[in-house]
Image (tube, rainbow, N blue to C red):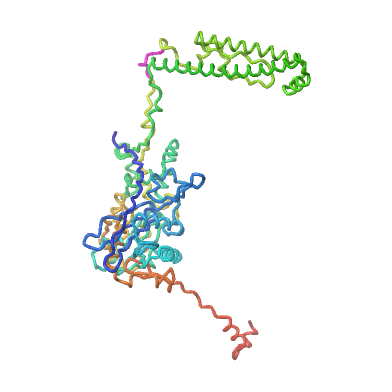
Amino acid sequence: MAANVYLFRDARAAPDPVLEAGPVAHGPQPVPLVLDNGSFQARAGWACPGPDPGPEPRLQFRAVCARGRGGARGGAGPQVGNALGSLEPLRWMLRSPFDRNVPVNLELQELLLDYSFQHLGVSSQGCVDHPIVLTEAVCNPLYSRQMMSELLFECYGIPKVAYGIDSLFSFYHNMPKKAVSSGLIISSGYQCTHILPILDGRLDAKNCKRINLGGSQAAGYLQRLLQLKYPGHLAAITLSRMEEILQEHSYIAEDYVEELQKWRCPDYYENNVHKMQLPFSSKLLGSTLTSEEKQERRQQQLRRLQELNARRREEKLQLDQERLDRLLYVQELLEDGQMDQFHKALIELNMDSPEELQSYIQKLSVAVEQAKQKILQAEVNLEVDVVDSKPETPDLEQLEPALEDVESMNDFEPLFSEEAPEAEKPVTAVQPVFNLAAYHQLFVGTERIRAPEIIFQPSLIGEEQAGVAETLQYILDRYPKDTQEMLVQNVFLTGGNVMYPGMKARIEKELLAMRPFQSSFQVHLALNPVLDAWYGARDWALDHLNDDEAWITRKDYEEKGGEFLREHCASNVYVPIRLPKQASRSSEAQASIKGPGPGGSGAGEQA
């Protein structure tokens, strides 16, 4: 493979195996199930107690569904995640339960949960008899949590559930155990980017900010850039391939303008451009046959034409013979004196007189005789003959197309434009060279930095939002100086969209520009920005397995409603719904009977 040329992997997801049974219960408590319910990818696994809690989540799949078609074939049922294989052929059918990062379609969410429980080997009958730790969005709407709790308790009959924020689980997984930490979390995912201040180990929800940009918008922007650049490969520039370019070939520029200036240098461009090779077929390179092979192919084509014409002549001769036999039968009726049947037959043939009948018989007889002679001649001479013109008889087949009007072998020459082998020019003649492989290459240059840059400059795609740096400055300005100093000592990056090379250096550069001279700050990147949320949720489940104050039980759900949330170190802040108390009709009636108090009459009259 040439330098800087990369092949698309076009990875196809393998179907997840169905586990026989989940882990056994640990003491009096069943083993918790941990579900990282992400808008891009869902991760599910068991929180097994013990010194070795187990490897990474057993189940990881794209959080999309596609409903199978019904019909006579029965149609496959809804397919979820890795069962879909390649997503591109089904892109128009894919459905997600998420709006941004908030689950809103609970019917599709139920399909994702069914898929998770089935493939994890949940063995309890009629219900899911395991506590569940489930991630949710920052400042998740109460209605979304209410619908999720209703689904879990009513449909699956779970004993208890705990909700937490994925980025907070990742934060506490990377922090020292039993340490109360403060800091700023920058979490960038598939749909959104959040900046979350943490004060004394708890989320400061009032100062959280969200940027509605993430990996999905970066992939869409990169797709538009390359489709405008290569309109001839419009269909081949798919979202799946754009996500692959973002994950493996893109990076964050420490200084965007300065990096663009570097790309203007031809040498820098040649050394750093990534040439993405699209799949193509070498059959399009044209014919490389020798003269003998060309002559053999020409002979095969001639033989096929001979067979085709012979078959058509035989079919036409059979039809003409049947027609002639019919007319001769009608003529015999006239000779036998059966006038009634004769006139009836003439009407069926759409003829007016016996003379017209005799004329048609003579023409058909000549046509049949000529066709027989041509067939015999073709068999003897093995030449391509043609069918004679058809007689002008009613209801006869139309003349066959031009192949049957050819009079000799020379008339076939226009069909085969190649010259005879002896007349061909030497192969060594200079011909233009067309490199088909190079034509199917996408040169990804400045696009490597343009697409991920949108979270710092949303104006690149026309979004009227502040970028990460401006939002970070806005949040810090809402705190006193000492609190700002405490927060910037622990700036934590997590989420799948912060895995670009150069992301940590870019955040450090932005903080250096906005912080006072010679002030200190520290930026940390999660050990595994994608899976640390699940690891943190697993650690939390094991630490709070017997802590009833951290879980929402079925009793809490029935008494306090589905939107109820028990707060903990990685949860949202619970803000209950406060409805204004409405006075009853009886109290209103009593108040109207009592009438206005002292001085109330004048006020009533003024009203």
Give the x, y percent position of residue 180. Answer: 26, 68
Task: Establish if 442 lies above or below 289.
Answer: below
Indicate whether residue 229 is drawn in magenta: no
Total count of labels: 0
Residue 149 visible here = yes
Nearest the viewer among 115 and 259 is: 115
Taking the view exactly as shown, the residue that stands out farthest to the left is: 51
Q: Is residue 458 above or below residue 225?
A: below
Q: Is residue 491 at least partly visible in the picture?
A: no
Q: Is residue 105 left or right of residue 520?
A: right
Q: Position of residue 251 (x, y in %)?
A: 32, 47
Q: Residue furthest bottom?
A: 598
Q: Nearer the viewer, residue 174 or 341?
A: 341
Towards the viewer: 387 or 233 = 387
Question: Which residues are drawn in magenta?
Answer: 424-430
Q: Nearer the viewer, residue 513 or 35?
A: 35
Quadrant showing the N terminus: top left
Residue in view at x 24 percent, y 68 percent: 178
Q: Residue at x 57, y 17 (%)?
A: 314
Name the chief secondary structure element in magenta. Answer: loop
- Residue 270 at x, y percent in the picture: 31, 36
- The quarter of the rendered structure image containing the C terminus is bottom right
Q: Is residue 150 above or below residue 266?
A: below
